[in-house]
Image: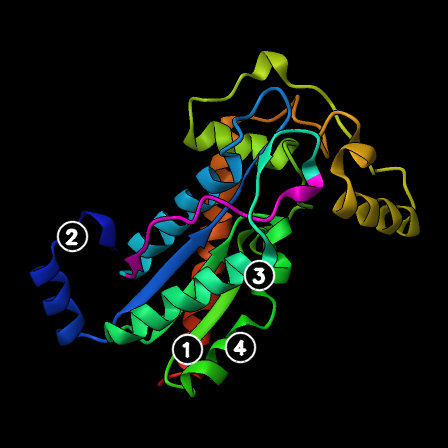
Amino acid sequence: MTDIKIQFDPILRKLIKNKKKIAIIPIGSIEQHGSHLPISTDSDIVSEVARKLADKKGYFLLPTISYGVSFEHAPFFNLSIRESTLRTVLIDLCTSLLENNIKTIFIINGHHGNLKSIKNIDVKINKILKNKIKVTALSYWHFMDREFDHAGFVETSLMLAISKNVKMRLAKKGLITDKMTKQEIIKIGKLANQSFPKATKNGIWGDPTKATKKDGIKILNEIIQNLSKKCQTYLTENRL
């Protein structure tokens, strides 16, 4: 792994000149995660996922974009940017990376509200940069064999594995969908996309009370293994 933010210009230029380098741009959010998890949870988790992936594969690791699209969490705390703003920042960063001779980029997403911003972003970037760069956006929760949640069992376990900033004594059950029909889950999911508090009441989707560090390590390892395989497949099929 090469963590760009702690490198020096001459070293970076030499590394880029000598090899075909691949970069990771992690994106997260700043928003409420109940009473037991910090507002930086999405950014914390995706930063660790990206760091481990970059370390495993030898990729360049860019600093995490910590702000995301989280307006749906109001009136609970959130610091949000517009979908178009996040998309523009990503396009500008990819353009700048190309100018520095980095032509393959993985955007690793850690927040559901960012999905619209990264949808078809590869098509948009290729149109602007005339197919001189390869970009793919991946959301880390698609690479685990569990239903994703918000401040529930999965996110809380992951945070226990990577952070000391978890207050388990304050963890409370949120929206539980186990006994809901598929149609009911889809309906409440649409409501959550508009107003998360109206869907979950306390801002939690799932049950964090039984989360453990051991489970978090297991889930994190699974994500890294599957994400690594996906990246390798992408590189094999999409060589510049």
Toward the top, the furthest residue is 169
Picture coordinates of residue 75, whole percent (x, y): 71, 30
Kind of residue indicated by mark 3: Ser
> Can residue 58 be found in the magenta stretch?
no
Which residue has dot 2 on it?
7
- Residue at (49, 84) in percent of width and height: 127
Residue at (52%, 40%) from the top-left corner? 42
Mark 3, mark 4: which one is toward the viewer?
3
**Label drawn at residue 124:** 4
Name the mark nearer the viewer: 2 or 4. Answer: 4
Residue that mark 3 sits on: 84
For the residue marked with disc 2, what is the amino acid? Gln
Coloration mode: rainbow
Q: Is residue 176 visible?
A: no
**In the image, which is nearer the foreground, mark 3 or mark 2?**
3
- Residue type for callout 4: Lys
Asked where in the image residue 163 lies, by quadrant, the reply is top left
Rendering coords of residue 53 (x, y %): 37, 54
Residue 9 visible somewhere in the drawing? yes
Mark 1 and mark 2 in contact (Cβ < 8 Å)? no
For label 4, the SS is helix
Magenta segment: 59-72
